[in-house]
Image: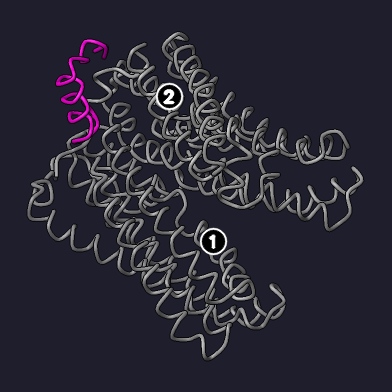
Amino acid sequence: MRKQSFIAGAVILTLAGLISRILGAMYRIPLSRLIGPEGIGLYEMAYPVYGILLVMSTAGIPVAISKLVSEKMALGDSGGARQVFRVSLFILTLTGLSCSLLLFWSARFLADHFLGDSRVYYSIISIAPAILFVTIMSAYRGFYQGLQLMTPTAISQVVEQFIRMLTMLCLVYLLLPRGVDYSAAGATFGAVTGAAAGLLSLLFIHWQQKKKLSFFSKNSSYLPRESNFRIAYRIFYFSIPIILGGLAVPLMHMINAILVPVRLQVAGYTMREATNLYGQLTGMAFTLMHFPTIITAALAASLVPAISESFALNRRKVLKFQAQEAIRLTLVVSLPAAMGLYTLAREICQLLFACPSAGIPLQFLAFGTIFLCLHESISAVLQGIGKTAVPVRNLFLGAGANILGIFIFTALPNLAIRGAAISTAGGFMLAASLDLLAVNKLLKIRLPLIDLLLKPCLCAWMMGLAVRKVYNYFFLLWASNFLSTFLAVLAGIVVYLLLMLVLGGIKRRDLEMIPKVGPLCINIFSRLGLLGLIRS
């Protein structure tokens, strides 16, 4: 495998993320039909505890590995890169094993006293081993991302999700006669087999790459070598702020879960109405708001090692270009996504959730998508230059603004759930704005507003008009929300891409950096005689 550009790496991870999301959505339908709401409840109750322990044991460390490996390789210290991997693998194996055993041994107490349902015990002990496999797997993913090879991570993600889905459905079906608690445990055990399969795929890739990549056998002992303790210290130094940032969003959601229903009742809603509105906000609108981050999360994972390499080699011009491109590409993706969610908010919520009223908070959350995506990509730039604490601080400030806004605006009868949505979008806007100011102060990057903001905004606005007209036309013709929404979204994608290509918002060099798909698009435009429309 050759080292990939950060854009090519982002595309690979995005495709893997989309496939994983589609597989994840596919198993939800038969799972719900097999074990019903009660079984789903037991299944979901085990995940928050697992998720917190997983964040504590892994979050941030793969990014730290990626950064340190990239720095070592940039300086020609292949031995140092191997040392970083060995030390991180030891740390993650130790923390993963500890957290798995902790979750297993405390399962009975958590089920009886913390979660309040003794039947969750089986789901908790079933999912406990997954932490060990996921933490070891994250060491390999961080290592290959540091080498700027995103394909191993992408392959392991798809394998993990496919085996997880297969195991869940088989075990749920086989264990259903024994009761819903055993079936839910079978569903959670899918996380174990999925993680184990993902790890095995990475071990196989690693075994193959050891024969292909020359640096595995190179001797770089002439370079000064850091001690294992120093490497471990640097890993924790970079990862702890990211772990805190990883906990910020779950903590914010937990506070929202307490605060939003209470403030809605102050606005005059009953407890049942408040719970219903909160479900629309978090279970539906939030889910759609986070969907475009599949792309920016992939961009961020690919960006950290690329930025780290440029920073280690003191390539200031390349570093500024990479940061500017990251911001530009984020806006190119997030602006049309936000416009699409805003324009078809009710229609999409009706299509996916059979709840068009969830479109009300979604319309206000839609533009928060832009700032959520910006926060992810700019955080990657800051992490790449070693400023890991800056985006975490900004995220906590944004979370504070979100909580304050919810407390004030959600209690106003004329805003209510809209106030919670506006506050959430405002919190991410504050965090992203502070991130942008920090990057500009540290790197002094030039942000051309015409290419960066004006062209994507104009194209997104025109796309929004086209989407609404296409939806209205086909809905009047067929009275089908599914077909009208599908065709409107498809038309929006085509209109936006064509306008961006014609106006120069997407350039030929952007297409050339996308593996296989980019050259294919250029070839199609050439055959159609439209290549002259694409700016280089």
Relative to 176, 273 lies left or right: right
**Residue 355 at what x, y percent from top left?**
66, 50
Picture colour scheme: one colour
The N terminus - image quarter: top left
Residue 522 within the segment the image draws in magenta: yes
Numbered label attached to residue 51? 1
Mark drawn on residue 411: none
**Please, what secondary structure does the residue beneath circle 2 have?**
helix
Residue 431 is left or right of residue 203, and the answer is right
Rendered view: 4 above or below 449: below
Location of residue 215 with respect to 389 vertically, above or below: below
The residue lying toward the viewer, choosing from 250 and 289, is 289
Determine crowd level at label 1: few under 14, some 14-19, many 20+ residues with C-alpha closer than 10 A.
some
Q: Say whether disc 1 or disc 2 marks the residue closer to the N-terminus.
A: 1
Whether residue 387 is visible here, answered yes or no, is yes
Residue type at mark 2 is: Val
* Front residue of 392 and 431: 431
Query: Which stretch appears magenta?
Result: 512-536
In whole angstroms, how far apart are the C-alphas of marks 1 and 2? 32 Å
In percent of width and height, residue 334 lies at: 48, 29
Residue to which mark 2 is pinned: 332
Per the image, label 1 sits on a secondary structure element best described as helix
Q: Bin the neighbour count of mark 2 within 10 Å (Cα to Cα): few under 14, some 14-19, many 20 and up.
A: many
Q: Which amino acid does label 1 sit on?
A: Gly
**Residue ranking furthest to the front:** 477
Farthest-out residue, bottom:
178
Badge 1 vs badge 2, beta-carbon distance below 8 Å: no
